[in-house]
Image (cartoon, helix red, strand yellow):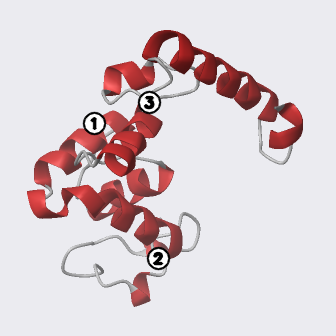
Amino acid sequence: MEEATKSIGLYRNKSKSIIGLCQKLIDDFGGEVPSTREELMSLPGVGLKTANVVLNVGFGVPVIAVDTHIFRVANRTRLAVADTPEEVSQALEAKTPAEYLLNAHHYLLLHGRYTCTARNPHCAECVLAGDICKFHGDDK
């Protein structure tokens, strides 16, 4: 497994987690991926973000997985001002209309990856700048 994951950062730990995850899926879940957040988070290497991605993408559950991009966008735009990804996730889920919840984390992630970037946000091209978002790249 280490050879297959060598190009990934922290590949030794990730390799151990993958092997442990597979073993636990076989031993505890009959080889099936569980469909609850708690069960997913019991798997080695699976935290809240990964569990929410699996629930959303794999099972169609309307949850928002918060990574560094979404955390940044939520706080900068004031959509969800919070100190932890879990708090941001809860706030975004409460504020997002039901019809957008299934894809909301994809939209926010892409916005954070390509427009509201960490070091040089593209505020001049941002559709949220001004009316919705008061952050300006110069105001860091």
- Secondary element type, mark 3: loop
Packing grade of label 1 (10 A; few <14, some 14-19, many >=20) is some
Disc 2 designates what residue?
115
Furthest residue toward bottom: 125
Q: Which mark, residue 72? A: none
Residue kind at label 3, given as amino acid type: Val
| Structural distance between the alpha carbons of marks 1 and 3 | 26 Å
**Residue 125 location in percent, x, y?**
41, 89
Figure check: 61 above or below 48: below
Taking depth in this image into account, of 83 and 8 the one nearest to the observer is 8
The residue beneath circle 3 is 33
Callout 1 secondary element = helix
Q: Tell me whether circle 2 and circle 3 mark residues in contact (CB < 8 Å).
A: no
Q: Which circle's residue, 2 or 1, is located before the other in the chain?
A: 1
Is residue 97 among the parts visible in the rendering?
Answer: no
Q: Is residue 63 visible?
A: yes
Three-letter code for the amino acid on which mark 1 is drawn:
Glu
Confirm or deny contact between disc 2 and disc 1 (CB under 8 A): no
Q: Residue 42 vs residue 95: left or right? A: right
The residue under the point 42% across, 89% down is 124
Going by the numbered disc 2, the residue's amino acid type is Thr
The residue located at (59%, 67%) in the rendering is: 119
